[in-house]
Amino acid sequence: MKLEQALKLHQQGEIAAAQGIYKEIIELSPNDFNGWHLLGLTYYQQGDLKRAIELITKSISFNPNYAPAHFNLGCALQDLNHWFKALDSYNTAIRIESRYEQAYLKRVEILVKLNQISNALTCCNELINLKPDYHLAFYKRAEIHLMLKNPLDALSDYEMSIELQPNFIEGHFSLANALFDLRKFDRALLHYQKAIAIDPHYDFLYGFYIQVKMRMCHWENISEDLLLFEKNLTEGLWFTFPFISLNLFDNPSLHQQVATSYVNKTYLNTHIPISSSSIKNKKKIRIGYFSADFRIHPTSQLIIEILRRHDRSQFEVYGLSYGPENNDSTKRYISTIFDKFIDVTSFSDTQIIKLSKDLGIDIAIELGGHTQHARTGVFLTRCAPVQINYLAYPGTIGSDVVDYIMADKTVIHKGNQEFFSEKKIYLPHCYVTHDSQNIIPESKLSRQDFGLSQNAFIFCCFNSSFKILPKTFDMWMRILKSVEGSMLWLLLDNPFAVSNLLKEAQLRGIDPNRLVFAKRMDLDQHLSRHRLADLFLDTLPYNAHTTANDSLSSGLPVLTLIGQSFASRVAASLLKAIELPELICHTQAEYEAKAIELARNPQKLTNLKKKLAKNRDKTPLFNGSQLTRDIESAYLAVYQRYQEGLAPEDVFVNTY
C-alpha cells in the first residue's frame, strides 16, 4: 500500500514526498531492493548523483538481476563522467534483459564519448537487428554515419526513422541539417517545413529554416517569416544559432541576446580559472590560435599575414586545428608558419583544454566564435588565462568568460559598445589586413570569358547568396533600371539561388540576361577577374568582409551602406583605413544615388580607382607589419593586466 502511494507521488513529480515514504519502506524492510532502488532514483532526479549511486548500488546487492537498477546506475555514473563504469552498468542491463533498448542507446552515447565510433555503429546495428521497427535506433545510427563521414548512409537512416515515426520532429530536423550540409537545399527546405508543421517552437528550427531559404534566395513569404522570427527571438521564446541573426537583423542588442541565450542553453557554466603557466624558464608569451579554418577559407586568408609577421623574440605561436578533415595547400602551408601546429580534430573539448594548459598557452585566440565547426565550448570552459574573440565571428560570444574582442572604433562604435559581453581591444585602424604574398597575376581574361558585355557598366558582388536580402536586391534592381545597359555580376553560389534571383529580377522589371553568375575559381584568378568589373556593391546587414578586402586589394572600389552592428560596419572600416570614406553611405537613397552617379560619370570613377591604387601602399589597410605590431601591443597589455591580477578592461592601442 505504501509503495503504491509512493509511486503515485513519484509519478506526479512529488519527489520529496515519495522519498519520505521510500525511507519508511526501507526502515520496515531493510532488504527491500525496490525501496532502495526507487529511493536512489529520487536522489538522481534531485541531482545528488553520489547519493543516488550509493543507494542504487545497495539495491543491486539485494537483487543483482534487476536490469532497470543497472540502467539507472549507469545514468548516474554517466552524468558524473565515469564513462567506463557507466558502460559496464549498461552492458550488465543488456545481459540481463537482451532487448533493453534504452540501455543500447545510452551505450552508444558512451562509446561516442570515448571516441569508439566503430563500436557505437556495431551497437546500433545490434539494436536494429533486435528491433527493426525502432525509429530511435535508426536515428542514432544516422548520427554515427555522419561521424564516420558516410552522409548518404546517414540520410537513409534518418529517412527510415521518419518512415517508422512520421511525426518524429528530431528526425525531420536532423535530416534537413544533413541535406543542408550536402547542399541539397531544396530537400532540406522540405523537411524543415515538415518539422515546423509538427512544432514551430522546436529549438533552433526556425532559424535553420530561414537560413536555407536565404541560401536559395527563396523569398516567398520571407517578410512574414522574418517578422515572426525577430518577434520570437526578441521575446526570448525561440533560440537560434547566433550567426544566423547577424545576417538577418542589423540589431546589436538582439545579437547579444541571441548569443547569450545560445551560450546559456548549449553550454554548462563550468568555466575554471587558470593560473599562470607553471612551465619553468619560459621567456616568451605563448599565443594559441584555435580554429576550424586552417584551410582554404577566408579566416586563413586574413590571419596568415599576422602569423607570418609575429615577433618570435617576444612570442611563441601555436596553432590548434580542428574541423573538417583536409590537407589542402593552405593547411599544409599555414602549418609551417606556427612554431607548433597540432591537429586536435579527434580531441574532445576537455582534451583540448588540458592540452592548452599543458602547452602553457598564455593567450588563446578564438578564431571561430559561433561559426560552423567552431569549438566554442573550449573557451567557455576556459583554456587559457586570457581569451580573445577575433576575426571569424563579427559579434559577441555572449559570455564574459571570453575576456576580449579584437576590433576597431568603426566596427564597435559608441552606439553598439554596450552589446558586447567581452571587453574591447581597439586597434588604431582596421582590425584586419590581407596576405601580402597574394600577388594578383597579370591575366588575359576578358569580359567575354565570363559572359559580360564589353561596353556595359559592370556592378558586381561576390558575397555568398545568403547575404543578399530582398531589400538589398531591391536597391540593386533600381540601380540597374537607372543605368541603361548595366549588368550585375554575382557569385554562382548554388543553382537554386541563380534560378530564384533571375526570377526575382524579372519580377522587378529587369531583363534576367543582365544578371551574370561567376563560377568559383582559384583565388589568384578570382582576384584577377575583379579588374573586369567597375564597382562592387556591398550587402547589408552582413557586409562583404574578406570579399571587400579582396576587391580593394584588386583595385575595385567598394560601395557600402553602413549599419549599426559589427557585421554591418566591416566594409566601412576597410574604406576608412584605405582613406576612401566617400564610398561609405548612410542611407539607402545615398547608396543608390552614389552607385548611379559613379556609373554615369566615368571620369569620377576613374579618379576613384586612381586614388584607390595610390592609397593601397601608403595607407594602413594593407600594412600587415604595422597591424601585427598593434596586435602584439594589445597582447602585451592584456597579459600584463592578467599578471597584475587586474580584471579585463577596454584597451586602446595607439600607433606611434
Image (cartoon, rainbow, N blue to C red):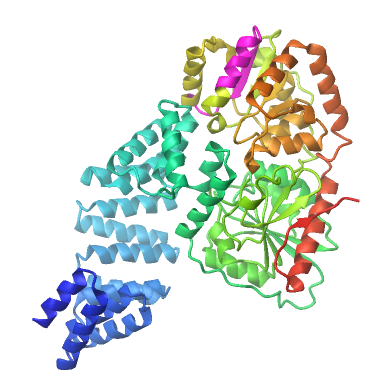
Side of 182 where 246 appears, left or right: right
- In the image, residue 540 sits, relative to residue 384, either above or below, namely above
Q: Does the magenta stretch include residue 148?
A: no
Q: Of all residues shown, which one is farthest toward the right?
A: 656
Quadrant of the snapshot with the N terminus = bottom left
Residue drawn at the location 37% of the way across and 63% of the way down: 109
Q: Which residue is rendered at x = 23% and y = 62% of the image?
A: 101
Q: Which of 420 and 461 is in front in this view?
A: 420
Residue 106 image-quadrant placement: bottom left
Q: Which residue is most to the left?
A: 1
Labels in figure, total: 0
Query: Where's residue 172, x and y in %?
Result: 32, 43
The x, y position of residue 488, in whole percent, is: 62, 17
Decide if residue 371 is in sight here: no
Residue beneath the point at 51% across and 22% down: 498
Does the segment drawn in magenta span residue 488? Answer: yes
**Residue 621, percent from left and from top:** 81, 39
Q: Is residue 88 shown left or right of residue 578?
A: left
Q: What stretch is highlighted in magenta?
A: 474-495
Q: Where is residue 643 in the image (x, y as percent from the top left)?
A: 76, 72
Between 101 and 165, the residue placed more toward the observer is 165
Placement of 254 over or under 474, stated as above or below? below
Question: Residue 76 lies in what quarter of the image?
Answer: bottom left
Q: Left or right of 330: which side holds 499?
A: left
Residue at x 26%, y 44% (from the top left corner): 162
Residue 62 vs 569, above or below: the answer is: below
The reply to whether residue 385 is in sight is yes
Q: In which quarter of the image is residue 125?
A: bottom left
